[in-house]
Image (cartoon, rainbow, N blue to C red):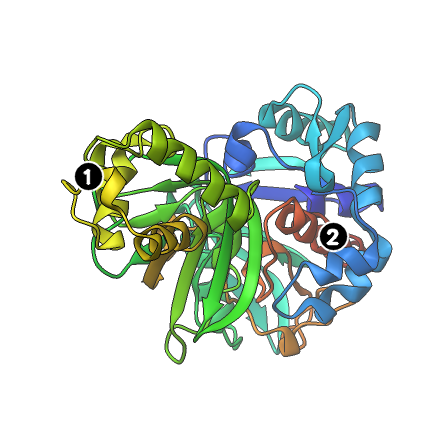
Amino acid sequence: MMAAISAAEKGASVTLLEPNERLGKKLNITGKGRCNVTNDADLSTLLANVPKNGKFLYSAFSRFDGRDAIAFFEGIGVPLKTERGNRVFPVSDRAFDVSGALEKRLKALKVTMIRDRVVSLETEEGTITGAAGEKGFYAADAVILATGGVSYPATGSTGEGHRMAKEVGHTVTPLQGSLVPLREKGNLCARMQGLSLRNVSLTVFESGKKIYTDFGEMLFTHFGVSGPLILSASSHMRRFEKKEYRLEIDLKPALDEAALDKRLLADFTKYANSDFVNSLNDLLPQKMIPVIVELSGIEPRQKVHEITREQRKTLLGLFKHFPVEIAGLRPVTDAIITSGGIKISEINPTTMESKLVKGLYFAGELIDVDAYTGGFNLQIAWATGRAAGMAAAEQE
């Protein structure tokens, strides 16, 4: 949509081919239906939040950064607000307002919208001549491919764009999920399935080395862990074939060890004559107690007043460093975005034009770039779409 708008604003005659019954199907589910439109960030902050091939986006972000995106969307009738972490949302908290405003702009610019699924790109002597759809052939001086990755295939991100790019000679790097839930080794998380933790601190270790820490909420599931904290952490965990990953959860980040020990002693005084297993209700969610008791090595029926200082120290360690060993990522179909895609060395970073096929352009998640959570992945879509649309309009 951004590519079509940008090309039409430059005076090109534009046809938008969409296989779904409505535009913006994936956009409408972003940010839990609220749509984290962008991040109110300057160029250096945007680039710092793209861990993979960020430099490739330097030109596109230079010409259309987070603040430009804010001005664009407010200009087409979407009032915006900025929340924690400079995340930008529509004031209405409705993703449909964003897709609706884009559609309205397309109509105002007289972009022809056709519901059809493109099956192949047509070229002649290394130059694009158009696209073949299920319903017919569409001749064109320029074609912009913006079909997304392979996450959330129900929204139309089925990998067809990668297939078509390969057919005309492009290289597609391995595709895997990013911003994706994590599978655990063992079954500790499965035993706490459905338990949501808020205001906890999470640290990621890669082969014993601390690589990332964050604060927020997460969820235990039948396969491992999910939730906002986990999705953000997953984009730092990219080398499962070579590295081991472990999470540590600080269940009480507001208290240092000394303060937490004091709190624990107060609870132990209160429950002095109770069994250990019945003494943790004030400190832990019910579902977590059997797991913590087991990991502590303290007998569940041991009387609280018999617990030694060493045993209490072990328990404190679990509160501050609850361990989850990670086996790997969930499948890419469960991911918010796709990591991997069309090789950046085969794309002109200024225009998003293919270096292999004249008149073919790429935008968005199809390209081998992906970012952390916080509006940065949509900003990649806007900036690359804008660059591709403006350059493609010059092709005519």
Q: Position of residue 150 (x, y in %)?
A: 43, 55
Instruction: Please state if 12 lies on the left or on the right of 165 as rendered.
Output: right
Which residue sits furthest top? Answer: 92
Work out whether 179 lies above or below 94: below
Q: Quadrant of the N terminus?
A: top right
- Where residue 245 appears, x then y in whole percent? 40, 68
The residue where tag 2 is placed is 383
Q: Is residue 209 left or right of residue 299?
A: right
- Residue situated in front as seen by the camera: 366 or 207: 207
Q: Which mark is residue 303?
A: 1
Q: Which mark is residue 45?
A: none
Measure the alpha-carbon separation of dots 1 and 2.
62 Å
Judging depth in this view, the residue of 302 and 213 nearest the camera is 302
Residue found at x 51% / y 32%: 32
Quadrant in which the C terminus is drawn = bottom right
Secondary structure under badge 1?
loop
Residue 368, located in which quarter of the rendered image? bottom right
* Mark 2 residue element: helix
Closer mark to the observer between disc 1 and disc 2? 1
Q: Quadrant of residue 282?
A: top left
Q: Residue 139 at what x, y percent from top left? A: 61, 55
